[in-house]
Image (cartoon, rainbow, N blue to C red):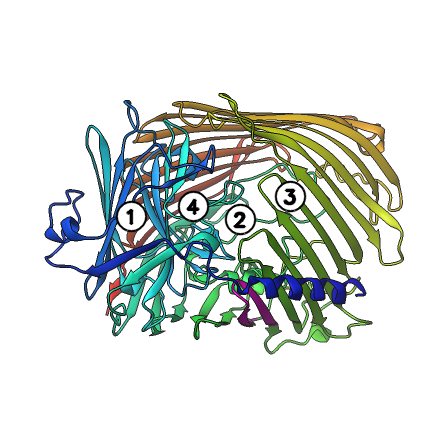
């Protein structure tokens, strides 16, 4: 705890320097009410567009950030009582077809010619929304948080059209005011526009952004100036009912296929233009794609992100608290092993400085697991300080209802009656984004807890054009518990310094190159050194957008509990045993402009028990743009250990096909063969977006045992959802 006061003082001093004027305040674009009705068709023949102010003369972000872009882009904006309108002329800088991956929604930014708008409706340089499209018309939308992070799982209701011409492509969009959150009465929003043109490999922005930061950085937005305050969206209630039918069968049960027939309802109620209430009754998430499997040779639980739409809006105010391996709240803990009966989420802005998040979810009993009905409650509050920093508080409570573990038979699993976490954190973000960091402290409460269930952590990061460094510490006591969080290990103290440097040569081929050195040190609560991973990398980014990286690493591990180094055979190394090794590897990712793309990586070196491990990973892709995208990922591990393990080999193979007949009709199918867990998974999903945010899904899933080949379980689900604005 002694370093916390030092970090807090340093952060407050840095935060106090963030009171300067907005960096790109001189970049201003006026927006006026429409003069005539606008048809979203990509033609730009309305009088409104002829007289609207134009944002042009974009600045290059990469490969250099010291000149105007050679690729010309023009942006115009307007509005009426219901919609915010946007039209963009994306001029070609050289002959040749555009480059896109497919018509898939929320496309891969680096593999598509695209245009994006980043909106900061509170002008707080921290939170906002992004919309855009690639050159074939595939839509992109997401919610922004932490000054530039984007959650593309967030979807909302809006329309757009892309029309291609010989010398340009035009993107036109209408975004309902009901689909975004903004402060009533405010006449200046933060705004920036980003253009990626893969033929010239130029990324550019209207308001200039230093090349070490993403174009989404809200610290560098210009200003959208309204001729009058944006209109009040009025009554803003959306009902999203669903109906579902399906079949499922488990081979081991020997039963006939079981039928599913369900209905449910989500509702979105805008209490103000910036504060939203989400309600759900008997939700179902069958439209969510299954997780991509990985070979797991780690000693701790792996993290898979949340994809369920109900949990996504303003999800950062809940799930952004803490660090990647020290999260007091992780929404995937809710409803994974038990059905969600109902729930409510209140989230958004109270005013420019205050954000709030409150959630209550109820799950039902699961008799087969002896799992009782449980209630999950979360309360989060965030106060902005300075220009871009904030202070946050979080309370998480998990409560088992009508449950006494003392009455549970000894041969059944027991569950805690409650688990609670309370936390405070300070997030630093300087006005120019050069300094970022965090200081946090957590306290857990559980039945019969012994000692202090406490955790604290802090980091400070500096990122200039060439030099970047970060220093982080974490402490988690042995009896700290976060049953609704993601804390894969407890009883440790961690130090993690890193430093890197980048050169940007005047070269025809190389964009940047440089080394980075990282070290991760773990100690147990008695101060004994238990883990050390130190690795050095050297990376080269080419102007073609391809990348090369070479690395070398040293690992030391003193096992704190018995561990199977193959995570499959059940034979373990003893607790307290010490292991150390060195390893080397390389990675290469090809340029995204080609129809055939690939990424290759390899690793060789030592492993536990003086063994050896070799790994090869490939990701191959081919596109028939813009309609079909084929991909194949393969991961091979060869492990050599002394007896009783001997030689072990794992294959993980995953072919995938994406067919996008239009930007509203999608088919995705993929197969995953995981030799480590002896499973073959087939997943196919058909989606028809017949109206904005309204869908028909057909999802088919199969799981097989590879040897002898036999079916484990399968399911077929038909789901219909409709977004209805009241």
Task: List x then y, in percent, for residue 261.
Answer: 35, 59
Can you tell which of label 4 and label 3 is closer to the viewer?
A: 4
On the picture, is 367 further left or further right than 286? right
On the picture, is 216 further left or further right than 263? right
Distance of label 2 from label 3 (alpha carbons): 56 Å
On the picture, is 420 further left or further right than 556? left
Provide the residue designation for mark 4.
208
- Image height of 70 relative to 150, above or below: above
Provide the residue designation for mark 1.
55
Q: Quadrant of the C terminus?
A: bottom left
The range drawn in magenta is: 373-397
Q: Secondary structure at mark 1?
A: loop
Q: Secondary structure at mark 3?
A: strand
User: Does residue 484 appear in this view?
Assistant: no
Neighbor class of circle 4 (other Cα within 10 Å; few <14, some 14-19, many 20+) is many
Distance of label 4 from label 3 (alpha carbons): 20 Å
Q: Nearer the viewer, residue 546 or 650?
A: 546
Distance of label 2 from label 1 (alpha carbons): 64 Å
Provide the residue designation for mark 2.
253
Can you tell which of label 2 and label 1 is closer to the viewer?
A: 1
Task: List x then y, in percent, for residue 10.
Answer: 70, 62
Can you tell which of label 1 and label 3 is closer to the viewer?
A: 1
Mark with earlier residue (1, 3): 1
Mark number displayed over residue 468: 3
Residue for point 46% across, 45% down: 209
User: Does residue 302 appear in this view?
Assistant: yes
Asked whether residue 655 is drawn in magenta, I would say no
Can you tell which of label 2 and label 4 is closer to the viewer?
A: 4
């Amino acid at each position: 705890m002694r370093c916390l006061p030092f970090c807090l003082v340093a952060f407050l001093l840095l935060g106090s320097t963030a009171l300067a004027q907005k960096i790109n305040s001189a970049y201003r674009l006026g927006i006026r009410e429409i003069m005539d009705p606008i048809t979203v068709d990509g033609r730009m023949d309305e009088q409104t567009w002829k007289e609207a102010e134009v944002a042009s003369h974009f600045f290059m972000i990469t490969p250099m950030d010291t000149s105007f872009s050679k690729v010309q882009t023009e942006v115009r904006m307007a509005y009426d009582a219901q919609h915010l309108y946007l039209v963009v002329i994306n001029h070609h800088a050289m002959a040749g077809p555009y480059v896109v991956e497919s018509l898939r929604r929320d496309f891969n930014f680096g593999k598509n010619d695209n245009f994006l708008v980043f909106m900061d409706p509170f002008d707080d340089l921290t939170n906002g929304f992004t919309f855009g499209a690639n050159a074939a018309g595939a839509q992109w939308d997401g919610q922004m948080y932490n000054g530039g992070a984007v959650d593309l799982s967030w979807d909302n209701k809006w329309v757009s059209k892309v029309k291609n011409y010989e010398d340009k492509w035009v993107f036109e969009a209408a975004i309902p005011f009901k689909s975004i959150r903004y402060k009533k009465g405010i006449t200046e929003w933060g705004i920036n526009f980003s253009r990626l043109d893969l033929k010239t490999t130029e990324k550019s922005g209207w308001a200039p952004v230093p090349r070490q930061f993403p174009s989404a950085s809200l610290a560098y937005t210009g200003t959208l100036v309204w001729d009058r305050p944006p209109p009040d969206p009025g009554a803003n209630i959306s009902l999203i009912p669903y109906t579902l039918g399906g079949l499922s069968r488990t081979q081991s049960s020997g039963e006939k296929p079981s039928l599913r027939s369900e209905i449910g309802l989500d509702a979105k109620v805008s209490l103000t233009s910036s504060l939203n209430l989400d309600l759900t009754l008997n939700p179902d998430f069958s439209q969510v794609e299954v997780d991509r499997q990985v070979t797991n040779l780690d000693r701790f639980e792996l993290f898979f992100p949340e994809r369920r739409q109900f949990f996504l809006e303003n999800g950062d105010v809940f799930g952004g608290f803490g660090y990647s391996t020290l999260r007091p709240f992780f929404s995937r803990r809710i409803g994974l092993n038990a059905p969600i009966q109902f729930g409510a989420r209140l989230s958004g802005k109270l005013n420019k400085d205050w954000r709030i998040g409150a959630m209550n979810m109820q799950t039902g009993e699961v008799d087969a697991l002896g799992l009782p009905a449980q209630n999950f409650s979360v309360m989060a509050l965030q106060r902005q300080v300075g220009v871009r920093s904030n202070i946050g508080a979080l309370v998480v409570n998990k409560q088992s209802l009508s449950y006494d573990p003392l009455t549970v038979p000894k041969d059944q699993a027991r569950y805690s009656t409650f688990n609670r976490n309370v936390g405070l954190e300070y997030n630093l973000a300087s006005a120019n984004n050069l300094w970022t960091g965090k200081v946090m402290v957590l306290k857990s409460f559980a039945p019969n807890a012994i000692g202090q269930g406490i955790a604290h952590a802090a980091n400070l990061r500096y990122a200039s054009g060439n030099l970047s460094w970060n220093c982080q510490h974490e402490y988690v006591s042995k009896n700290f518990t976060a049953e609704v969080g993601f804390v894969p290990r407890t009883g440790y103290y961690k130090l993690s310094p890193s430093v890197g440097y980048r050169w940007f040569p005047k070269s025809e081929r190389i964009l940047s190159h440089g080394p980075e050195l990282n070290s991760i040190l773990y100690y147990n609560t008695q101060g004994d050194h238990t883990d050390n991973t130190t690795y050095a990398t050297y990376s080269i980014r080419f102007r073609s957008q391809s990348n090369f990286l070479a690395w070398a690493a040293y690992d030391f591990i003193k096992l704190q509990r018995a561990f199977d180094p193959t995570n499959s055979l059940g034979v373990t190394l003893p607790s307290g045993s010490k292991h150390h090794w060195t390893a080397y590897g390389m990675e290469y990712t090809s340029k995204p402009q080609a129809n055939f793309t690939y990424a290759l990586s390899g690793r060789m070196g030592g492993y536990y028990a003086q063994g050896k491990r070799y790994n090869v990973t490939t990701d191959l892709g081919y596109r028939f743009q813009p309609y079909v995208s084929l991909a194949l990922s393969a991961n091979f591990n060869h492990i050599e250990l002394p007896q009783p393990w001997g030689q072990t080999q794992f294959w993980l193979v995953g072919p995938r096909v994406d067919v996008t007949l239009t930007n509203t009709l999608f088919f995705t199918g993929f197969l995953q063969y995981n030799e480590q867990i002896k499973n073959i998974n087939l997943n196919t999903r058909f989606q028809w977006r017949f109206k904005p945010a309204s869908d028909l899904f057909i999802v088919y899933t199969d799981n097989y045992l590879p040897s002898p080949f036999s079916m484990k379980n399968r399911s077929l689900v038909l789901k219909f959802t409709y977004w209805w604005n009241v």
